[in-house]
Image: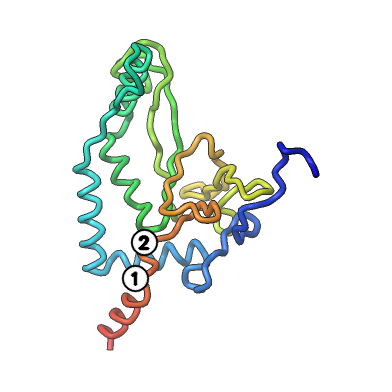
Amino acid sequence: HGSPFKEFGSTGLKRYDGAVFEEYDRKWKDLNTMIALVKEMLDHPIIAAMMFAIEMSFRRAEFNVLPAGESQADKDAARFLEENMNDMSHSWDDHVTQFATTLHYGFSLFEIVYKRRLGAFKDPESKYDDGLIGWRKFAFRSQDTMSPGREWIFDEHGGIQGFVQNAPPMYQDVAIPIDKSILYRTTINKNNPQGRSVLRPVYMPWFYATNLAEV
């Protein structure tokens, strides 16, 4: 019967050599082709206005940290978390704005970079000088910088182990482990790291409207 601790099955995600092939439409099947298509769709005035309204609603949201309990340890943990949210090299609003690209492409990626909190006169600087480890930044890793055809690192069961970036100006593959990353996605169906773009169902009406306008 095998060991109860061994994993036998997989997620069933259609993938090959780090690339995902869940889509049936060829314009959406390849990640690079999909990203180029979405960029074009985002220039449509109605889609652009809709996405702007959604992004602004995100930015207006308030983010607060509440202690998990009444103990002093819980209160200290909440305070430490809130300090780190407001002690990065970018604002929390900037992170929220970059997160909004999750809707465009179905996913967004950030690399977590840490720092030791050594005060305002050290590099990297911090508002605190207690020597604790905090967040330096959530570095955005743009969807269009993924290494073509080998974007993701999977284990044998379909678990996500990381992603591969191939970005300018060096254009060299850099593997970033998942435990040092933040992955946002619109859906987790089959544990697909690419989620699903909210613009996918809009493609057909956009296509006909665009071509009718050209005619």
Identify the image quadrant of the C terminus.
bottom left
Which image quarter: residue 38?
bottom left
Work out which residue is located at the far bottom of the displayed protein and give it. 215
| Amino acid carrying mark 2 in the image | Val
Which image quarter: residue 40?
bottom left
What residue did someone put label 1 on?
202
Q: Is residue 129 above or below residue 17?
A: above
- Whether label 2 touches label 1, CB < 8 Å: yes
Residue 165 image offset from top left, x and y in percent: 52, 48
* Foreground of the two, 139 or 8: 8
Residue 88 image offset from top left, x and y in percent: 33, 28
Work out which residue is located at the far front of the displayed protein and give it. 1
What residue did someone put label 2 on?
198
Helix or strand or loop: what does disc 2 sit on? loop
Tell me the crowding category of disc 2: few under 14, some 14 to 19, or many 20 or more residues within 10 angstroms, Cα based: some
Distance CA(mark 2)–CA(mark 1): 8 Å
Identify the image quadrant of the N terminus.
top right
Q: Residue shown at 70%/43% (left/top)?
A: 7
Q: Is residue 129 above or below residue 181?
A: above
Q: Residue shown at 26%/58% (left/top)?
A: 51
Tell me the crowding category of disc 1: few under 14, some 14 to 19, or many 20 or more residues within 10 angstroms, Cα based: few
Q: Is residue 29 above or below residue 127?
A: below
